Amino acid sequence: MQVQSMHFKARVGEKLADKRLQANLKKLSTKWVAGRASAILELDDFEGTRDAAKERRMRAIENLDVWLETFEKKATERGATVLYAESAEDASRLVVEIAKKHGVKKVTKSKSMVSEEMALNKALEAAGVQPVETDLGEYILQINNNEAPSHIVAPVVHKDKDEISDLFARVHNRPRLTDIPQMTREAREMLRPQFLSSDMGVTGGNFVIAETGSVAIVTNEGNEGMCTILPPKVHVVVTGIEKVLPTLEDFATVLRLLPRSATGQSITNYVSLLTGPKREADVEGPEHMYFVLVDAGRTNLVGTDFQEMLRCIRCGACMNHCPVYQKIGGHSYGWVYPGPMGSVLTPSYVGIENAIDLPQSSTLCGECHVVCPVKIPLPDLLRKLREKQVEQNLRPKAERLSLTLWAFVAKRPALYRLATKIGVRFMRMMAGNGKTISKLPLAGGWTDYREMPAPSGKTFRELYKQRR
């Protein structure tokens, strides 16, 4: 997927003006935010479970090489082939080579954000292999001119029923339907022949389990089973190297948090643990199983200030609750991962110079940290990225000079008191007889779009002294 994060500001302007998108994004707060709040109440000790999940994820990250070697050994013993890809391009090349090796003409895919990193569909098509997305949301995007996902859990959250109804009628060449069960049945009828004629199935992996050499896949539609068990002779798992968990007990702990944080469910409809290809006594399953474990910038975070980001379990809770994402949607961020987690991952994976505005695309309200099931300190990581931008002179010169001036004043209490005393009185004067300021020098970014509450004309220290 091509990086477009450098166009963040222009995209934001478009999305804020899109009234239909604004209405669609309200589903985040009315459905998932409320759903998560109810679902976590079912746990006797939610905070204790979060602490346990954090500890188990970090145990894997801090000894990543050990657990990856253990996983490779166990998976190989069970008949799978484990391959490592240093870059996203390497990963796509490996999958294409597997397809060619087995004479594959059609690939059915379940949802995988790593495959978006890899631009896998484009690579397969270039090799003469037809990729078919089978997750309902991803399928909708694929038939809509290969549109990019806007959310990591619900890729089509930015569209409403009428848009999808029009799309189905146009692409499927069938009468337009508006009843959701009928629409999903129509999608199943279109996808079933694709499943049955597929030569290879490609899935992501929520986690890979070191002690058993298994992949854990969590879905709500069951399409991953059709991609891995029934028709295809080859199953390829593509996932990031950081997704390894040492034991099944670790997976059980994280699974108590993942669906609750993602969609507000106690458990998802389908939880699959797949271990190796079909054996002699097995009735169904693939004849060949491959794991393509993707680095693509992940090891660059190990041992750095951003290592904690690697324990992300891709639940999407941070973006569901983010006031910025709730207004601009996922396409504004310009790459695979949107929202607060994307604002850290994208600069880390593709270069901070290619995502200059993403660390700024946050109010730093802290809600993302509060709801993160594995307690990633996202506001702290965003602040660290902002610091790196300033250190590397990547921010505008006027902004850097302003911060330098503010720092100079803030380090001198007497000067700071004088400056704030003058500042609040000037702002009071700008408000005139009103309670708000409609125009303020050097603050056009705020007052061009909204009014600023006017101060009383006294500093906090003055008000506090007066109250005492």
Image: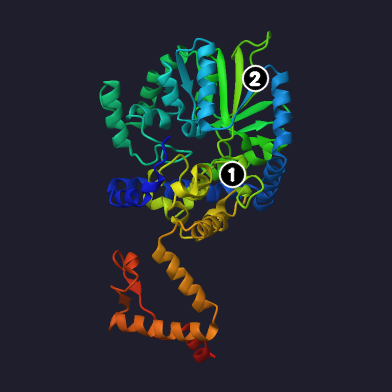
- Nearer the camera: disc 2 or disc 1: 2
Q: Identity of the amino acid at label 1? A: Cys
Question: Residue 140: where, in percent of width, then height?
Answer: 37, 30
Question: Residue at label 2?
Answer: 81
Residue appearing at x 69%, y 38% in the figure: 64
Residue appearing at x 55%, y 45% in the figure: 261
Question: Residue 278: where, in percent of width, then height?
Answer: 64, 13
Q: Quick check: can you spot residue 430?
A: yes
Question: Residue 29: where, in percent of width, then height?
Answer: 44, 50
Query: Residue farthest to the top?
Result: 280
Counting other residues with Cα less than 10 Å from the Cα at mark 1, is it few (<14), some (14-19), or many (20 or more)?
some
Left or right: residue 18 versus residue 228 is left
Q: Which mark is residue 167?
A: none
Query: Which sits earlier in the primary sequence, circle 2 or circle 1?
Result: 2
| SS of the residue under disc 2 | strand
Q: Quadrant of residue 157?
A: top left
Question: Residue at label 1?
Answer: 312
Nearer-the-camera pick, 64 or 373? 64
Quadrant occupied by the N terminus: top left
Residue appearing at x 63%, y 28% in the figure: 215
Q: Identity of the amino acid at label 2? A: Thr
Q: CA distance from mark 2 to mark 1?
A: 26 Å
Q: Quick check: can you spot residue 229?
A: no
